[in-house]
Image (spheres, rainbow, N blue to C red):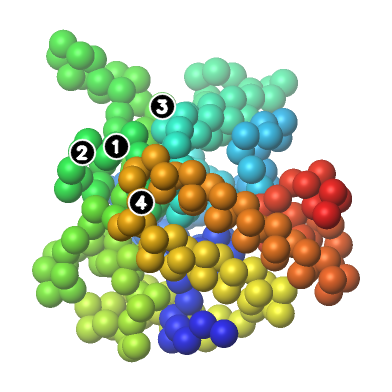
Amino acid sequence: MLSQVFMNPTNDLVFKRLFGSNDHVNLLISLLSALTGRKIEEITFLGNETVPGNKQLKAGKAIIDVYCRDEDHNKFIVEIQNDAEENLLQRFMLYFSRAYYGQLNPKAKLKGLYPVIVVAITHRIPDLDHRVGEHFSHHRLLNIKTYAHDIKDIEFVLVELSKFEKKETELENDTERWLYFFKHIKLAKKIPASLQHGVFKKACELLQHMRLSEAEQMAYEFSEIKAMSMEDNAEKLAAGDIRRAEAKGKAEAQLELAKKLLLKKMSVDEVAELTGLSVEEIQKL
């Protein structure tokens, strides 16, 4: 069993428990307000996080789809993506496309579609490795000559925790406090002084006292142990080898976990949700 005082908030399961329901909606309001620079007043969860008909967008990714009421009535997709996968930027474009097109219905009018902002909290985005030290980026469509922001329906807010290097004593605002929380809380022995107030204290306390079922706990520990193993080996591998090793290690861990959960008489659908494997992959075990 892992000897963590606080569970890892970047873990898919834990992230969804923390931010994915009305029980702690004030946490998500604070997080989105900090990352987007907008004052979020109200959030409505939109339900199913699965992207229908697209096998490349696998189950098991912690995607939270919400409608946010702010001054512009924006709609947000929030994703926690803890793997340094290739083609993440393309994945984010698919999320935007799904959310924007998904607003259409027989009674909808094009001029009534809400803007979509994709917010991604990641460990690393390989396509942005050349942006050294740039841990936070906010992307909009601008006119290349005048820089006018006339097309306002698409935005991306991207966070790379691996590039966030501020110490606790250097934190200046809520955005930096949230990033520090995501990157460092899992290794803390007590709530850091900078997080001992408001929503940050509440989030830390929830991580400290979160209760998981036996199967969920097993899935969580498999994920954490696999991540720690990859970190230990990373310095010994070239970039291409790291990606191949990550993919292989993740696949092996998912299969091993799936076998253990099946032995506990869990349904195929439940195993798929906890491991990120497809129903077809599990049925072959």
CA–CA distance between discs 4 and 1?
20 Å
Contact, mark 1 vs mark 2 (Cβ under 8 Å): yes
Q: Secondary structure at mark 1?
A: helix
Q: Is residue 152 above or below residue 180?
A: above
Amino acid marked by disc 1: Leu
Location of mark 1 (residue): 128
Contact, mark 4 vs mark 1 (Cβ under 8 Å): no
Location of mark 2 (residue): 131
Judged from this view, the residue extending furthest toward the front is 236
Which of the labelled discs sits on residue 153, or is there none? 3
Q: Earlier in the sequence, mark 4 or mark 3?
A: 3
Question: Quadrant of residue 71 in the image?
Answer: top left
- Residue 115: give x, y in percent of width and height: 44, 31
Judged from this view, the residue extending furthest toward the left is 170
- Residue 5: give x, y in percent of width and height: 43, 86
CA–CA distance between discs 4 and 3?
41 Å
Q: Secondary structure at mark 2?
A: loop
Amino acid marked by disc 4: Leu
CA–CA distance between discs 2 and 4?
21 Å
Q: Earlier in the sequence, mark 3 or mark 1?
A: 1
Does residue 152 appear to the left or right of 230 in the view shown? left
Which of the labelled discs sits on residue 237, or is there none? 4
Quadrant (top left, top right, bottom left, bottom right) of the C terminus: bottom right
Residue at 59% of width from left, 25% of height from top?
A: 101
Q: Secondary structure at mark 4?
A: loop
Residue at 55% of width from left, 55% of height from top?
A: 249
Q: Is residue 31 above or below residue 83?
A: below
Residue at 65% of width from left, 38% of height from top?
A: 51
Q: Earlier in the sequence, mark 2 or mark 4?
A: 2
